[in-house]
Each structure stands twice: as C-alpha cells, then as structure tokens.
Image (cartoon, rainbow, N blue to C red):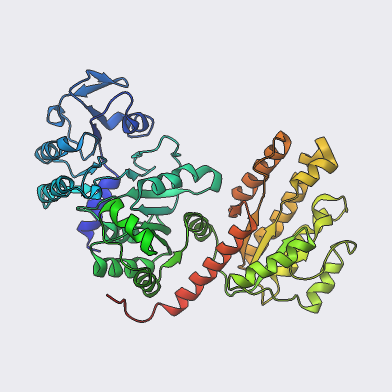
Amino acid sequence: MKTSKFDQLDRIFLPRSAAVIGASPRDGFANTLVGTKIRDRLFMVNPNYQEILGKKSYASILDVEDPIDYAVIAVPSQLVIGAVRECIEKGLKAVHVFTSGFSETGLEEGIKLEKELASLAKGKIRLIGPNCMGIYCPKSGLSFNPAATNEEGSIGVISQSGTIAQMFNYFERSMNMKISKLVSYGNAVDLDCPDFLEYLADDPYTSVIALYIEGTRQGTRLHSALKYTAGKKPVAALKGGVTREGGRVASSHTGALAGTGETWSAMFRQSGAIQVEDIDDLMNTTVALSSSPPPGGKGVSSITYSGGFSAVQSDMCVKAGLEVPQFSKEAVGELRKIVPVAGTMMGNPLDAWQMFYRYSGNESRLADVFRIIAAEKHIHSIILQFDVIKFMVRMWGGQAGERLEVIARNFLEGCRYARDEAGKLVLITVYLDPYTDHEQERQLSFFLKKLCQSQGFPVYPTLNEAIRTVAYMYRYSVIRQDGGKGQVEG
C-alpha cells in the first residue's frame, strides 16, 4: 500500500475532531461518543437544538469555527446530499453516512440517490457507507455502540453488516475479544472492503483480522487485497449468502453482487484467508488466532470428566478433520502415577474426573498432566473440558469456590507450559447451564472463565465450538504452508 493511502485512512480512524450531523439527545451516536475520549473534540450539528447532551448544537457544520476531520451523518436520506456538500466545503477528510434508503432498497429513487452521492464524493472527500454503522476505534474514541469497551486490542474487524459489527462489540467482554479497529462499511460507494483490508494489513496495532462480507463490485481488487493482507497476518472470513437463497438476501441487503459460493471459497483459499461457516466460528476463530499459536498438526488431546464425552469428543474431532492419537506407553505410565485409576480412562481423551471435583490430594499434579500430554509428538492441540462446576457445588457447597480456585490455578500452570513452552494450542470449555437459577454456579463459572481468559486462553461455552475452532486453526496452519494454489474463476 502507498504510504499516502495508509495515512489517509489512518486519519479517518484517528481523527483529531469529529461531528455528528443530525444529532439529538436521543441519538445513539451522540450519546455514545460523549462517553469516549473524543468527547472534548466532538461537535453536535442540528438546527433544531441549542444544546445537546451539554454541548452546543450548531445549525450547520459550516458554523463550527474549529477544523473537523470526520463526521457521522444521521439525517433523512433526502438531506444527505446537502450534508455531504457542506462537509466538502468545510474541508473534512471523511464522512460516515449512517442513513439508509439507497441502493439496498432496490427502488429507482434509492439507486439514483446513491449514484448522486458517489459522484458528489468522488475525489473530494472519503465516504464510508451509506447504510452502515461506521467506525469503532478505542484508540481515537470513535464508536457507535455504547456497549463497547474503551480497551485497545489487536483484533481488526471489517463487516459489511452493521448488526454483525455490533455483535463483536457486544461479545468483547464475555469473550475477552480486544479490538484495535472495526468498520461497518455498508453499500461502499467509496471506501470498500479492499481499502480496509490493505489498511489493516499495514496497521501495526492489528495482528489478526475478522471479515464479514456479503458481496463486492470489485472482485479482482478484493482478491488482490485479500492475498496481500493474508500474506502479512491471519484473516478469518465469513461470506454471507453462499447459497442461492442467502445470495438473494445478501444482494438486496447492501446492493452488492453476491456471486456464487464456489467462487468465493476459491478466492478465500487462494488468497490464504480462512473461510468459516457462521458468526460463532468467525468470533471464536478470531479470538484463538489473536492469543494462540496455530497447531503444528491435526492431533488433538481432550482432557474431560466423562467416559461418554470421551467417545463423543473423538467422533467430533474426526468429523472435523482432526485426529485423536493414542498416548505412548511412556505417557500412559506417567499418567497412571498421577490420575486415580478407579472410574477413569487412561487414554486419549483422558477422563480425569476425580482430579477435577473429588478430593484426591493430587491437585498440585494437575500441571504435570498437561506437561506429559504436551510432550507427545503427535499431540498438537489440547482441549480442557471443565464443565463440572455444578457437581462441585453439590459436593462441596460453600467450599466449592475455594476448591475451584486451587484446582484452576494448578491446571492453568500446566496449560501455560503446554502453550508457552511446548508450543501447543490450548483451548478451554466452561459450560454453564443456560437455564440454571443457581447463583453460586453462575458466579463460579464466571470466575473460572475470567481467570482462564486473564492468562490468555480462549474459553468457549461448548465442546463443539472448541473443536470447530481447533479445526479452523489447523486449517490456517495448512494454509500458511500451502500459500494458496490455482486461479479464481469468474
């Protein structure tokens, strides 16, 4: 990417000042932005108010004496052209048009209005949208979601859908998903997906990128941008509308060309991006890529609390394209010295339930279990299924929290060794019955999840999500070695 292009987009994500055109006391953008670090450099524009949320309201952006870099336009569609024209006259670097009612409607007047908007902006101002949520950047304070945190991270998100962009904000805290920059770009009459891919590829604060896309008018350029970006950092991609029915919906959502599922899969594969199947996969895989090394192979070991789950886990791993190798005789011998024999299964998966919630006196040896398994050459990923809090509460009552902390700190020591010393991918599942009304169970599950996340481990609510994530992570390691082959059709 040319340095000038990067600097141009960097100024958009990191503006010196911003305005909300069409602000009101009930406006989501105004209410959100006054709560971020950009509040002292934020201007409200609406001729119907003298003051909004304690800040002076201007009748026009031309009335603001201070220079402004960036504006959110949230006025009815018939007023957008006039607002953009005033922003150009004011000398703004960029505008985000939140307003809908353009080509996505499929109506002639909406399509005509969008063409007029694109023509007006061309060469005069950079434009995000219309029909989108715009930018979230904790470093600058730009945001569109009051639920978002102000904590800076390393995950970049590009989403054609505003709702899916907001989902990343909603799940930031619960998934320990720390975002560097996020953009919802909608109809893309000016700045489009390739622009944001190339920018985040060169952004030193972004280490992994999540992409949700429905369609494009720039297939060749998108392929080039994907290949450039995936060559520098991991890209997890979800295409909305890979079926005929989904493609029809995707085309009508933003007015972009959806294309066939096969064509998109080929483009992702050849560019080096990891294609995932749903929004949960996208978030889960992104979190894992941001915190863990990809596995060196497809061998998985599960540490569980049930013989039944051991069989199910093995089936799930194989169906996901992974392998469940048996432990070596040496490893089994070492494990027998630690794991109680009665009621357990000394194999892979390892059923070690007695060490989890019955008193065995061997809690301090839990770390050794992970060291032994991590030393196995054919094991590349480890999944710890810790879903026994309900049983611990029943057995230990008021002492369950103390017991849980002792056990967790010991197994986390082993998890850190497996990840940091042995280079294994380590994922943890903490399940909570969504229908439980038991407050102690909820509190302990939350405590354990946060404790594991504080050590940098991805935590998932179900075994299925953890196994699917391992499969995508393994796919990424293969993609890195393969580099993508063949040509994109069409």
**Percent of width and height locating residue 133:** 32, 43
Q: Can residue 384 be seen in this view?
A: yes
Q: Against 50, is 39 above or below? A: below
Q: Which residue is drawn at 35% across and 50% down?
A: 161
Q: How many labels does the image show?
A: 0
As drawn, is 274 to the left or to the right of 365? left
As drawn, is 215 to the left or to the right of 350? left
Q: Against 158, is 316 above or below? A: below
As drawn, is 41 to the left or to the right of 242? left
**Percent of width and height locating residue 114:** 16, 48
Quarter of the image that includes the N terminus: bottom left
Q: Can residue 152 be seen in this view?
A: no
Residue farthest along the top direction in this orientation: 50
* Along the viewing direction, whichever of 475 and 56 lies nearer the viewer: 475
Among the 4 quarters of the image, the one containing residue 152: top left
**Percent of width and height locating residue 454:** 60, 48
Residue farthest along the right direction in this orientation: 342
As drawn, is 473 to the left or to the right of 23? right
* Along the viewing direction, whichever of 274 and 316 lies nearer the viewer: 316
Q: Which residue is drawn at 23% across and 60% down?
A: 3
